């Protein structure tokens, strides 16, 4: 009985991962698979193209001369024509030219508008109070001291010069270093501002003090700090700031000597001669009325509750 040959179950060479054996990846020919894929693809796949990560925007077609003319006319019409965002007062403004504009209505709305109205009314009340106090004390030039020569046309800004009253040294000249005003809204706080259009909105003012020296000249080292030979600065209440100068003084000796013009010097002489009446005005300003005391008590209760 003849014996059968044994079947070999193992390869002559050990197996290796694809691409790392005797045949390298670069030697493989995959064109047959590509051709078979092309033969069996659908019509939709044949017409499709591969899209990259970024798509190219189609070129904007150039407008003809007629289209450019129409486009320009429409742009001019939109600029000149008011857009009817709503009805009522805005329609009245468009048709008759009266009433608020769109920008004014948008700007003056909500709590900010209410705060602006309250602040304006409070500033007017302060000016009325200044007028009443100076009139009762019989201070000269009440019309000048009522608004302190501060208005929309002549705002109160940093670096301004004006007359102030010190109960110990009388009428002095001051340079504005900082302005403080009360912000709008409930439980508002006092903060620094760069300018004011009403002296009634002023909370406090920080001034560098200049004392009269000779004729129309003022010095930067007053008697209050003469011992230390330094400049003097004070934080005043609004009532103690009298008015802004008509013209800027002439500065000499590196800012240590100031010279006033004729008009401002006349006002200074007039106010200096009324020191007693100004002293009385300061005393009247410190008196608290029953209404103001009740307002302070109410604000104190609100702060404690918050």
Image (spheres, grey):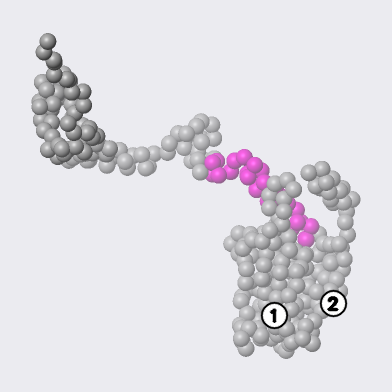
Q: Residue at (62%, 63%) from the top-left corner?
A: 194
Q: Residue at (78%, 83%) from the top-left corner?
A: 225
Image position, residue 244 (x, y; %): 67, 70
| In the displayed structure image, the side of residue 181 where residue 298 appears, left or right | right
Q: Residue at (43%, 36%) from the top-left corner?
A: 83
Quadrant of res 180: bottom right
Magenta span of residues? 104-131
- Residue designated by label 2: 168
Is residue 199 positioned above or below 106 on the image?
below
- Residue designated by label 1: 265
Secondary structure mainly formed by the magenta segment: helix
Which one is in front, 210 or 264?
210
The numbered mark at residue 130 is none
Quadrant of res 126: bottom right
Is residue 16 positioned above or below 142 on the image?
above
Which one is in front, 40 or 265?
40
């Amino acid at each position: 009985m003849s014996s059968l040959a044994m079947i070999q179950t193992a390869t002559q060479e050990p197996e290796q991962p694809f691409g790392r054996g005797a045949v390298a990846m670069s030697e493989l020919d995959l064109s047959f698979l590509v051709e078979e894929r092309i033969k069996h693809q659908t019509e939709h796949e044949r017409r499709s193209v591969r899209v990259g990560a970024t798509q190219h925007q189609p070129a904007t077609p150039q407008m003809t001369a007629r289209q450019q003319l129409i486009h320009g006319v429409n742009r001019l019409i939109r600029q000149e024509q008011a857009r009817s965002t709503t009805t009522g007062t805005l329609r009245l403004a468009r048709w008759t030219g009266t009433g608020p504009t769109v920008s004014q209505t948008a700007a003056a709305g909500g709590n900010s508008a209410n705060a602006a109205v309250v602040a304006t009314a409070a500033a007017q009340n302060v000016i009325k109070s200044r007028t009443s106090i100076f009139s009762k004390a019989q201070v000269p030039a009440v019309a000048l001291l009522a608004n302190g020569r501060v208005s929309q046309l002549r705002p109160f800004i940093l670096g301004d010069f004006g007359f102030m009253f010190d109960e110990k040294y009388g009428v002095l000249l001051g340079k504005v270093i900082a302005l403080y005003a009360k912000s709008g809204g409930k439980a508002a706080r006092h903060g620094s501002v760069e300018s004011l259009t009403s002296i009634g909105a002023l909370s406090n003012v920080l001034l560098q003090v200049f004392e009269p020296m000779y004729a129309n000249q003022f010095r930067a080292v007053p008697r209050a700090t003469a011992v230390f030979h330094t400049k003097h600065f004070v934080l005043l209440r609004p009532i103690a700031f009298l008015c802004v100068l008509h013209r800027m003084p002439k500065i000499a000796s590196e800012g240590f000597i100031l010279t006033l013009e004729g008009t401002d010097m006349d006002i200074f002489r007039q106010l200096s001669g009324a020191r007693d009446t100004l002293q009385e005005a300061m005393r009247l300003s410190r008196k608290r009325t029953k209404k103001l005391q009740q307002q302070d008590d109410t604000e104190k209760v609100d702060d404690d509750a918050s």
